Image (tube, rainbow, N blue to C red):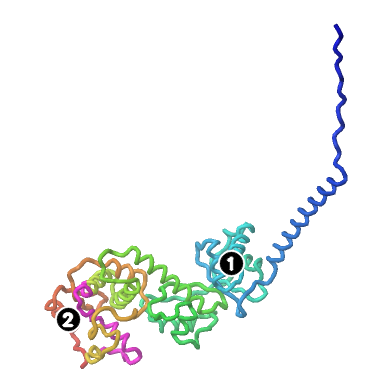
Amino acid sequence: MAESRTRRLKPRPPRRAGPGLARLLTRALLLVLVTGLAVAGGVAWWLQRPLPLPAAGAELSIEPGTAPRQIARDWVAAGVDVDERLLYAWFRVSGQARQIRAGSYRLQPGDSVRDLLQRMVAGDSVMQAVRLIDGWTFRRWREELARAPGLRHEAAHLDDAALMAALGLAGRAPEGRFLPDTYLYGPGVSELTVMRRAAQAMQRTLDAAWAQRAPDLPLRSPDEALILASLVEKETGLAADRGRIAGVFINRLRLGMPLQTDPSVIYGLGTAFDGDLRRADLRRDTPWNTYTRRGLPPTPIAMPGRAALQAALHPEATRALYFVARGDGSSVFSDDLAAHNRAVDRYQRRASPP
């Protein structure tokens, strides 16, 4: 039998990349490197280039708790001509998105995206405040803003219609559209920016209150709720009476009775009102005269606060149809005219002027 022979195989040496493959790998690595450098350079250029801004610049007031994504969106709405997604991405990639501080900020031509974020993270060093008081009229609000120190006054030459158009509310009456509150602003911020914040705050508050309104109210829209709230605001002298005053107005609306509220008559008189409301004034017909016209007036008569909005949309259940001021801020409520007349005789002793 023949012996089997075992063949010993020599290990093959590893293949070396040929000249062509090596060149391909080198080129691929160089391409990746160049692309990375180009991307990095592009990002650096984008961060440092002047932002596309309106000629007058752009400004924004950031409320506490505003999300970084919303801040990016608001800057674009304020006139910064960049993709809001890129702006938000920079906030996130920088690691400083959660360090942005509430405040008022202004961008000038030449400012970059990097400048924008650094400014918001540093925060405003000096903040001032202006207050809108519950029950103020729009005219009174404009006067307060005109006196506010540090504001840039751009609305002095605008009439009410032009001002509302500048705020993005063209065609809407200004009365009642601004939420009473304290508004902070930085030096050089436009009064239009403060007014825009107040208008947006009122719209948010009104929408939320309307969504939570009591059922079966004789109100057809949020605007009617705003009008009613302004009447409640001007008639309320004591906070505890606010809900019942709203209840009286609701009862009258349901019955089709005139609301007969003096503040609306005074509002309709405008600058002709001299401080004394006469019987002749009650008979002088204007769109806001709730003695000569039934239902709600065409617009609010003042800026209602949050409490008045809540009262208008959650009125106290009452049978009262009348109320009269005691003279100490509180009111006496009556279910019928005879009781009301007795209350008038008791608490309104001074005869009304002819």
Separation (CA) of disc 1 from disc 2? 56 Å
Residue 158 or residue 37, whichever sits in front: 37
Q: Earlier in the sequence, mark 1 or mark 2?
A: 1
Please tell me how crowded label 1 is: few (under 14), some (14-19), or many (20+) other residues with Cα within 10 Å: some
In this picture, residue 40 sits left or right of residue 327: right
Q: Is residue 48 left or right of residue 181?
A: right
Q: Is residue 47 magenta?
A: no
- Magenta stretch in the rendered image: 251-277
From the viewer's perspective, is residue 30 above or below residue 203? above
- Label 1 residue SS: loop
Residue type at mark 2 is: Val
Residue where numbered disc 1 is placed: 123
State which quadrant residue 79 falls in: bottom right
279 to the left or right of 61? left
Which one is in front, 78 or 267? Answer: 78
Q: Are marks 1 and 2 in contact (CB under 8 Å)?
A: no
Q: How far across and how far down the image is residue 224, in percent?
A: 32, 74
Residue type, mark 1 in image: Gly
> How many numbered marks does the figure carry?
2
> Hey, which quadrant is residue 39 in on the image?
bottom right
Kindly identify which numbered label has been placed on residue 173: none
**Image quarter (top left, top right, bottom left or bottom right) of the C terminus:** bottom left
Residue at 35% x, 91% y: name it. Answer: 271
Q: What's the mark number on residue 344?
A: 2
* For residue 278, above or below residue 102: below
Q: Nearer the viewer, residue 20 or 254?
A: 20
Q: Residue furthest front?
A: 1
Q: Please, what secondary structure does the residue beneath circle 2 have?
A: helix
Which residue is found at the position 34% from the left and 67% from the top?
210
